[in-house]
């Protein structure tokens, strides 16, 4: 049978019984199957009917019964084949962490459904935690920035309240010189600075740490070649204070001596 053309209807019907009984060789069986699929549906139905009749004919069965031990021999061969294939995979069972093998001998450790759920939940929680951490860092940075801006904006208002709105005219004027007064032993924590504009001769006094005292308790004076002049009497709240001194005529800043004395005449702060 060397033709590659599909079998005719007659050939298919003649070989139908041999095909169902497995009596065709490998080439003939493949050729018959290919021809069967190329046959019309009516011919295929006819072949199926013939093969069904042949397969159900008990007269074709041999009269001898199989050996009762045949079943056990077949099962033994199958079990041995399974054991041989399993032994080839044995090294794979040692991969991973050591543990007790399941009772049925299966070397795999499948993750139960609950374990898969908790694993997914852990990943989800880790992601959520990371997101919240990022939001927290950004919120903290934003809060710090807002506080910084608020502090900057509030600084000017505080200084204007403590010192007065004219302090900027002295601090940021390039013609202003700053004369620092140092404390004597009578008030070691006291501080004072005089801002003097050499162009306009206007002066401004800033004090801090003077003991709290009522009006006229402290006097700022300046002594130069023209003599001594009392510039301002003032009270102290104990904190930062500012006083505009108006126009101050000083013959020479290099030789001038600035002093703050208390009501008893004791020198509290001096530039000398």
Image: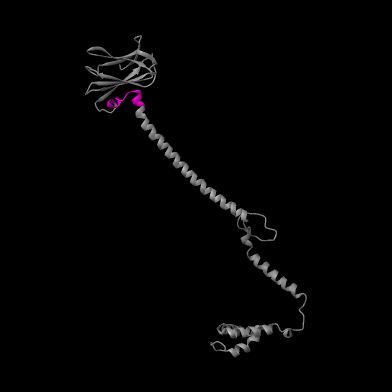
Return the x and y of residue 262 as percentages of the image width and height: 35, 12
Question: Magenta span has 30?
Answer: no
Residue 48 against residue 106 in the figure, above or below:
below
Image side of residue 29 versus residue 164, left or right:
right
Q: Residue at x 49, y 46 (%)?
A: 131
Task: Give the residue at the far top of this rendering.
Answer: 264
Q: Quadrant of the N terminus?
A: bottom right
**Residue 14 falls in image quadrant:** bottom right
Q: Please name the colour scheme applied to the rendered image.
A: one colour
Return the x and y of residue 46 as percentages of the image width and height: 62, 85
Question: Magenta span has 160?
Answer: yes
Q: Residue at x 62, y 88 (%)?
A: 13
What is the span of residues highlighted in magenta in the rendered image?
158-170
Image side of residue 37 versus residue 166, left or right:
right
- Magenta stretch: dominant SS? helix
Return the x and y of residue 211 as percentages of the image width and height: 39, 16
Q: Residue at x 69, y 69 (%)?
A: 80
Disc tally is: 0
Residue 60 against residue 141 in the figure, above or below:
below
Which one is nearer the viewer's eye here, 73 or 138?
Answer: 138
Return the x and y of residue 190 as percentages of the image width and height: 37, 18
Which one is nearer the viewer's eye here, 16 or 183?
Answer: 16
Image side of residue 86 versus residue 160, left or right:
right
**Residue 193 falls in image quadrant:** top left
Task: Give the residue at the far bottom of this rendering.
Answer: 10
Q: Residue at x 51, y 47 (%)?
A: 128
Q: Quadrant of the C terminus?
A: top left
Is residue 23 among what the camera can see?
Answer: no
Which one is nearer the viewer's eye here, 180 or 10?
Answer: 10
Residue 29 against residue 177 in the figure, above or below:
below
Residue 68 against residue 165 in the figure, above or below:
below
Is residue 124 among what the camera can see?
Answer: yes
């Amino acid at each position: 049978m060397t033709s590659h053309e599909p079998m005719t209807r007659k050939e298919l019907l003649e070989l139908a019984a041999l095909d169902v009984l497995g009596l065709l060789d490998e080439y003939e069986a493949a050729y018959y199957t290919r021809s069967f699929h190329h046959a019309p549906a009516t011919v295929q139905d006819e072949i199926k009917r013939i093969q069904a009749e042949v397969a159900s004919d008990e007269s074709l069965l041999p009269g001898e019964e199989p050996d009762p031990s045949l079943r056990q021999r077949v099962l033994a061969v199958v079990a041995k084949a399974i054991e041989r294939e399993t032994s080839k995979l044995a090294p794979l069972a040692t991969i991973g962490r050591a543990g007790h093998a399941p009772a049925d001998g299966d070397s795999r450790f499948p993750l139960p459904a609950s374990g898969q759920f908790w694993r997914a939940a852990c990943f989800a929680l880790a992601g959520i935690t990371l997101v919240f951490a990022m939001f927290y860092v950004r919120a903290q940075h934003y809060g710090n920035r807002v506080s910084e801006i608020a502090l900057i904006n509030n600084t000017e208002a505080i200084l204007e309240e403590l010192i007065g709105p004219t302090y900027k005219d002295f601090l940021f004027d390039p013609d202003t010189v700053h004369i620092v007064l140092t404390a004597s032993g009578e008030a070691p924590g006291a501080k004072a600075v005089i801002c003097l504009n050499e162009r306009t001769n206007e002066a401004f006094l800033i004090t801090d740490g003077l003991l709290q005292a009522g009006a006229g308790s402290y006097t700022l004076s300046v002594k130069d070649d023209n003599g001594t002049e009392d510039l301002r009497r003032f009270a102290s709240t104990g904190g930062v204070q500012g006083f505009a001194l108006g126009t101050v005529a000083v013959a020479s800043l290099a030789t001038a001596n600035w002093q703050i004395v208390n009501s008893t005449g004791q020198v509290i702060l001096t530039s000398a």
